[in-house]
Image (cartoon, helix red, strand yellow):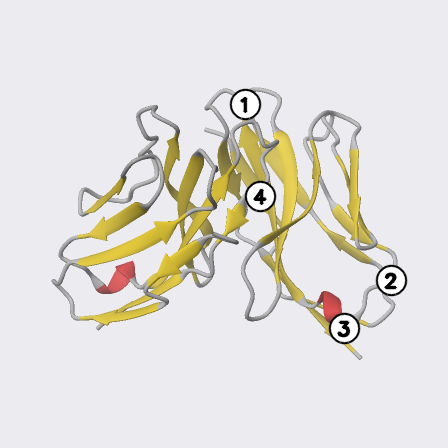
Amino acid sequence: GAGVSQSPSNKVTEKGKDVELRCDPISGHTALYWYRQSLGQGLEFLIYFQGNSAPDKSGLPSDRFSAERTGGSVSTLTIQRTQQEDSAVYLCASRLQGGDGELFFGEGSRLTVL
Amino acid sequence: GDSVTQMEGPVTLSEEAFLTINCTYTATGYPSLFWYVQYPGEGLQLLLKATKADDKGSNKGFEATYRKETTSFHLEKGSVQVSDSAVYFCALSETDRDDKIIFGKGTRLHILP
């Protein structure tokens, strides 16, 4: 596609429910990142996929968070048993391998946990 | 681990004022450094970058110089415009972690006409 596509753009859920957020990166981009943007907290790194390598999960805040990337393309971020502190904008970005660091971001998925 | 620290906002300036947004980093290797910008209602986009010491990145009148001796990458613009109002993020690419990219907390800039 023309850019990084994320869905849903907005999600309101009740505390304790599971949510799935989807990211469709730019075609041909081998690296895919998930970040969380909270008010006053800036951009928090969550997880990073690069080609067929094992993902870097060092930023996932708890075991309620997981992500997968199927076929080296689309990625899904899953949050189980959501809590109010999970409310944030979840941003996905992709990059060409060796693309000198430039990330291309999606518009984000705004999650509100009631 | 590697980290990025940037000045807290919001920063409010009048049009045509000189802008500096400070950014310092901690890194074990030799990272690449970036400034990203998020305009109201838009996604983040790369503003400028520098990949080695003493490099100067520039774009849209903004400049930043990679200073290894002070581990800094301050963003400057000589004369800001209302259209520069946005959130600015400093970032680094960890060279020893296969390009994991770490961001600062962001600095919100308001330019008054």
> Where is residue A9, by image quadrant?
bottom left
In the rendered image, residue B5, in percent from the top left (x then y), is placed at: 58, 43
Cα separation, mark 3 vs mark 4, equals: 25 Å
Q: Is residue A112 left or right of residue B25?
A: left
Q: Residue at x 56, y 27 (%)?
A: A98
Q: Amino acid at mark 1?
A: Thr
Q: Amino acid at mark 2?
A: Ser
Q: Earlier in the sequence, mark 3 or mark 4?
A: 4
Label 3 sits on residue: B82
Q: Is residue A58 left or right of residue A96?
A: left
Cα separation, mark 1 vs mark 3, equals: 36 Å
The disc numbered 3 marks a residue on which chain? B
The disc numbered 2 marks a residue on which chain? B
Label 4 sits on residue: B5
Mark 2 and mark 4 on one chain: yes
Q: Earlier in the sequence, mark 2 or mark 4?
A: 4
Mark 1 and mark 4 on one chain: yes
In the rendered image, residue A17, in percent from the top left (x then y), is placed at: 13, 63
Mark 1 and mark 3 on one chain: yes
**Tag shown at residue B79:** 2
